[in-house]
Image (cartoon, rainbow, N blue to C red):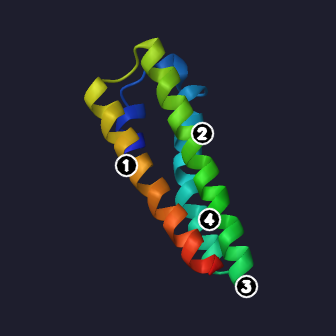
Amino acid sequence: MAIYKLASSFPASERFGLVHQLRRAAVSVASNIVEGYGRSTTGEYVLFLGHARGSIFENQTQLVISEGLGYGTSHLRQTANDFSEEVSRMLVAMMKKLRN
C-alpha cells in the first residue's frame, strides 16, 4: 500500500510507465507468497517466496529511479523502501526456516 500511495503522486505521464511497474511488482510480492503457500510442496513454496523477494528488489530499483527523477516525496519513498526491506528480511527468514 505504501507503493500505491507513493505512485499516486507521480505525474500522469508515468501512468503506463513507472507507476505501472511499481504497482505490478508490489502486487506480485503478496501474490507470490499466497500462490506459493497454496502449492503442494515446501520446495514450491520456497521457490515462490524467492519470486516474491525478486519483486521486492524490482520495487527497490524503481524507488531509486523515482528518486532520481524527483517523483514523490522523500518521506513516501523512504516509507516504501523501509517496508520493502522489512518484508525482504522476513522472506529470507521464512525461506531459511522452510529449508531446514
Tell me the crowding category of disc 2: few under 14, some 14 to 19, or many 20 or more residues within 10 angstroms, Cα based. Answer: some
Q: Quadrant of residue 32?
A: bottom right
Could you tell me how many numbered marks the image carries?
4
**Amino acid at circle 4:** Leu
Give above or below for 99 relative to 56.
below
Of mark 2 and mark 4, the one earlier in the sequence is 4
What's the CA distance linking mark 1 and mark 3? 28 Å
Identify residue for label 4.
49
Under mark 2, the amino acid is Glu
User: x, y percentage for residue 47?
Assistant: 71, 67
* Label 1 Cα crowd, 10 Å radius (few <14 / some 14-19 / many 20+): some
Q: Which residue is mark 3?
A: 41
Q: Which mark is residue 58?
A: 2
Q: Which mark is residue 83?
A: 1
Q: Are marks 1 and 3 in contact (CB under 8 Å)?
A: no
Relative side of 66 to 98, left or right = left
Which residue is most to the front?
100
Query: Label 1 sits on what residue type?
Result: Phe
Above or below residue 68? Residue 4 is below
- Residue at figure coordinates x 47%, y 13% from the top left: 69
Q: Amino acid at mark 3?
A: Thr
Q: CA distance from mark 3 to mark 2?
A: 26 Å
Instruction: Give the secondary structure at mark 2.
Output: helix
